[in-house]
Image: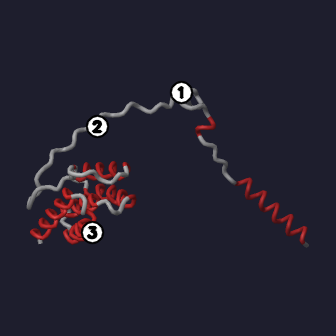
Amino acid sequence: MKRFSLAAALLLLGLLSGCAQVYVPVSQSHPVGTTPAGTSTQPPPPRPVPAPPPVVEEPGGPRIEPSASAPVSGNSAVVNLLEEAWRLNRAREYDRSNAVAERAMRIDHAEPEVYLVMASNYVAMMQLQLAEQLVRQGLPLAGRRPGVKSELETLLAQIKARR
């Protein structure tokens, strides 16, 4: 009886393994930079980056821009994400800007400029309660960043004036 169950288990294992897909990385299947036909797979040249749109004053107060007074987090990923978030903010793509800022927040939740850009986005979308919450979370983190702290305080004053 044991031989039968062992044989059945091995047979089942053999059948299941025969259905498994085999993964072969592209880099191992062909020499680097070529395809099976021998053509090049080099990426196209980079496209020129368009100039950012002009900054337009929002009704009810000036737009908040990133602080140049003190460097942001020492993490280059956070710096790059914040630059992208501000670019999207200037392009009025507030949801996308918040998504990028949230990625930066997951990397460094103590970076006050993350809270500034997200709050700025929510003010522009007239979601003032969320904006105020983010400003209040960012203010205690901005202790050594007087420029960011000042911008957060300005944004808080704008939020209170709009209510």
Type of amino acid under label 1: Thr
Checking the image for residue 39, the label placed there is 1
Task: Please report contact status of discs 2 and 3: CB closer than 8 Å, yes or no.
Answer: no
Type of amino acid under label 3: Gln
C-alpha span from label 1 to label 2: 29 Å
Residue designated by label 3: 137
Residue 27 in the image: above or below residue 68: above
Checking the image for residue 49, the label placed there is 2
* Neighbour tally class for label 3: few under 14, some 14-19, many 20 plus, Cα within 10 Å: some
Q: Residue at x 61, y 33 (%)?
A: 30
Q: Residue at x 10, y 53 (%)?
A: 57
Residue 107 image point, x, y percent: 39, 58
Viewer-proximal residue among 52 and 64: 64
Residue 145 in the image: above or below residue 37: below
Q: Residue at x 77, y 60 (%)?
A: 13
Residue 56 image point, x, y percent: 12, 50
